Image (cartoon, grey):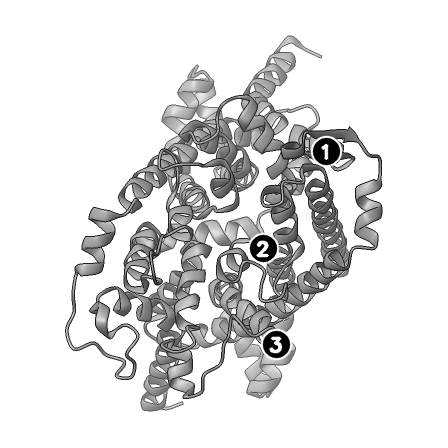
């Protein structure tokens, strides 16, 4: 194929993918469109751009509060599932764990677990423990739900680390904690980043549990706040578009800036066994 | 057993203890509890709470709404997964063929995948707007995408495919990158054309990862909730109400804790059965390969 034809083919693929992202860019454009022009299409392009929708969303809606809740809940969920997941993955990958096969089977099975199956008992449990509408309740549920995938991914990454490094540390008299701190964690860093990103995205995006266990702005996360975005007389499409963009901000940053780790985690989740 | 081995085992158990406690309390215990709940008649607002045996399941067997939801779930899953596989493989092949801009291409795809399903639903709600939605403006013909029972399910499927196809594409793309160049060179030496290379070499090599992608996507489609709950709420006329949406509405909108749990248990069993079938298929594939 000639160089020119190649360049053309590349451009066509890029164009097709740009077209694929139109739903997103259309919403982005909508979020900057003046209110009066929203329902008056064509023309597709606005006469001017405005920050009015963002001003309304930030000053008059519960979105900022939901943004804070989501950031806190997703970060703490990630932290908790790594703190519990790293030692567990290490035991699965390296230590003589009794009943390892059974545990692995349970882990694989629970990644297939549908949330709807446990939402009713968890609701009763949350109510009994007075964890409804709290960060703690949602963090516990999210972390336990994310844990099987966390362990699965991390165990795969740990197996890729040459065991000699740990053996050398053991010869030098390092205990388990020291081996983790000085040998394992540094070598595991890229795998940890991939796993953390996927866990964070899961918690940030999760809707069913968040919708069921939250009642007020005290714990409502961003997908819930967006789903319940209020309209008084008519649907505020511009405000909803602005709110959607705010809700997509961390995922976008992750896709654009940390793509390598994200793809690595996605692929590892499917291929490792 | 030497004391050193015993110590290693103790250490291993200590390492998994937090995980076992968390999964036990928040996954296994509720997983058993839901089965118990499904055998009860529990409607808290009327103060009803008694053991009902298999009554809920017996009712489901003759419940037209349940069967309608089961059909919708099947149609949604088949439609969504089939489209994702075709588009996902096509996108992966297209990106692999690119000389420049692969990273940007992956970014454009993953953009759709990474955002919350609720955002995806809001994006499409606006695209489907009967008067001002981009789709109808471009078509120049007013279709009531989310209000017409004839097109609502395809519309929901399309919104779901848009957000989840990139997952299939990225997995396939990663597998394509792992195929060594000499495989293609050998094919060229043997005089294989482009089509033959695609059907005889590339697609068979994608087989296994594709099966895995289909497994993950089927499980996700069977338990999908956010997209139809936010986009249509199960309507119009129940045409987009899947089993998960039906279970949710029974549980938290009509507050029938026992009956809703029975529907949840069915979804649970369905997902596990599909997962088991796929895993058997995958294992058979490993032996054959």
The dot on residue B37 is: 1
User: Camera-side residue: B284 or B50?
Assistant: B50
Are the residues at dot 2 and dot 1 in contact (C-beta closer than 8 Å)?
no
Tell me which numbered mark, 3 or 2, is placed earlier along the sequence: 3
Q: Quadrant of residue A155?
A: top right
Residue A264, image x, y percentages: 44, 52
A166 lies left or right of A67: right
Q: Secondary structure at mark 2?
A: loop
Ranked by sequence position, the earlier of labels 2 and 1 is: 1
Residue B251 can be seen in this image: yes
Label 3: which secondary element = loop
Chain of the residue on which disc 1 is drawn: B
Q: CA distance from mark 2 to mark 1?
A: 22 Å
For this orientation, the residue located farthest to the top is B3
| B130 on left or right of B2 | left
Specify the quadrant that holds the N terminus of chain A.
Answer: bottom left
In three-dimensional space, the C-alpha distance between marks 3 and 2, rounded to whole angstroms, equals: 20 Å
Q: Which residue is mark 3?
A: B150
Q: Position of residue B154 (x, y in %)?
A: 58, 73
Q: Which mark is residue B224?
A: 2
* In the depicted structure, whether residue A207 falls above or below residue B179: above
């Amino acid at each position: 194929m000639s160089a020119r034809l190649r360049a053309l083919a590349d451009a066509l693929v890029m164009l097709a993918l740009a077209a694929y992202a139109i739903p997103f860019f259309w919403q982005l454009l909508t979020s900057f469109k003046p209110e009066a022009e929203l329902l008056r299409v064509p023309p597709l392009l606005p006469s001017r751009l405005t920050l009015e929708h963002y001003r309304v969303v930030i000053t008059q809606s519960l979105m900022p509060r939901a943004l804070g809740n989501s950031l806190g809940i997703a970060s703490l969920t990630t932290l908790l599932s790594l703190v519990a997941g790293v030692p567990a993955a290490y035991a699965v990958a390296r230590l003589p764990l009794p009943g390892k096969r059974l545990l692995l089977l349970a882990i694989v099975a629970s990644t297939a677990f549908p949330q709807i199956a446990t939402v009713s008992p968890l609701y009763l449990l949350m109510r009994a423990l007075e964890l409804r509408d709290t960060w703690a309740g949602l963090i516990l549920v999210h972390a336990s739900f994310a844990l099987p995938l966390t362990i699965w991914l991390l165990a795969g990454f740990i197996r890729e680390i040459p065991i000699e490094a740990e053996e050398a540390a053991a010869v030098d008299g390092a205990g388990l904690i020291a081996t983790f701190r000085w040998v394992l964690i540094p070598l595991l860093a890229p795998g940890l980043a991939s796993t953390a990103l996927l866990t964070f995205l899961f918690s940030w995006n999760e809707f069913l549990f968040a919708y069921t266990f939250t009642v007020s702005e005290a714990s409502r996360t961003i997908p819930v706040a967006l789903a319940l975005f209020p309209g008084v007389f008519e649907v505020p499409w511009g405000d909803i578009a602005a709110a959607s963009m705010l809700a997509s901000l961390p995922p976008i940053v992750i896709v654009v800036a940390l793509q390598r780790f994200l793809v690595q985690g996605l692929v590892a989740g499917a291929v490792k066994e | 057993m030497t004391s050193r081995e015993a110590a290693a085992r103790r250490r291993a158990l200590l390492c998994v203890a937090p995980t076992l406690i968390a999964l036990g309390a928040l996954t296994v215990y509720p997983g058993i509890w839901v089965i118990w709940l499904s055998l009860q008649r529990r409607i808290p607002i009327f103060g009803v709470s008694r053991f009902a045996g298999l009554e809920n399941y017996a009712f489901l067997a003759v419940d037209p709404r349940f069967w309608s939801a089961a059909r919708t779930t099947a149609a949604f899953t088949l439609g969504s997964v089939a489209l994702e596989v075709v588009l996902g493989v096509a996108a992966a092949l297209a990106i692999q063929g690119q000389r420049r801009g692969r990273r940007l291409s992956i970014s454009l795809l993953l953009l759709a995948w990474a955002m919350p399903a609720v955002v995806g639903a809001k994006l499409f709600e606006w695209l489907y707007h009967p008067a001002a939605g981009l789709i109808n403006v471009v078509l120049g013909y007013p279709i009531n995408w989310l209000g017409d029972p004839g097109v609502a399910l395809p519309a929901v499927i399309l919104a779901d495919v848009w957000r989840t196809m990139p997952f299939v594409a990225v997995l396939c793309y990663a597998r394509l990158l792992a195929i060594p160049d000499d495989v293609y060179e050998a094919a060229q030496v043997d005089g294989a054309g482009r089509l033959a290379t695609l059907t005889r070499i590339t697609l068979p090599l994608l087989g296994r990862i594709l099966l895995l992608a289909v497994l993950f996507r089927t499980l996700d489609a069977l338990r999908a909730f956010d997209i139809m709950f936010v986009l249509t709420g199960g309507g119009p006329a129940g045409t987009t109400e899947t089993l998960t949406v039906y279970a949710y509405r029974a549980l938290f909108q009509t507050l029938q804790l026992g009956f809703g749990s029975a529907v949840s248990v069915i979804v649970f069993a369905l997902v596990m059965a599909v997962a088991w079938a796929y895993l058997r298929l995958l294992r058979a594939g490993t032996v054959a390969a």
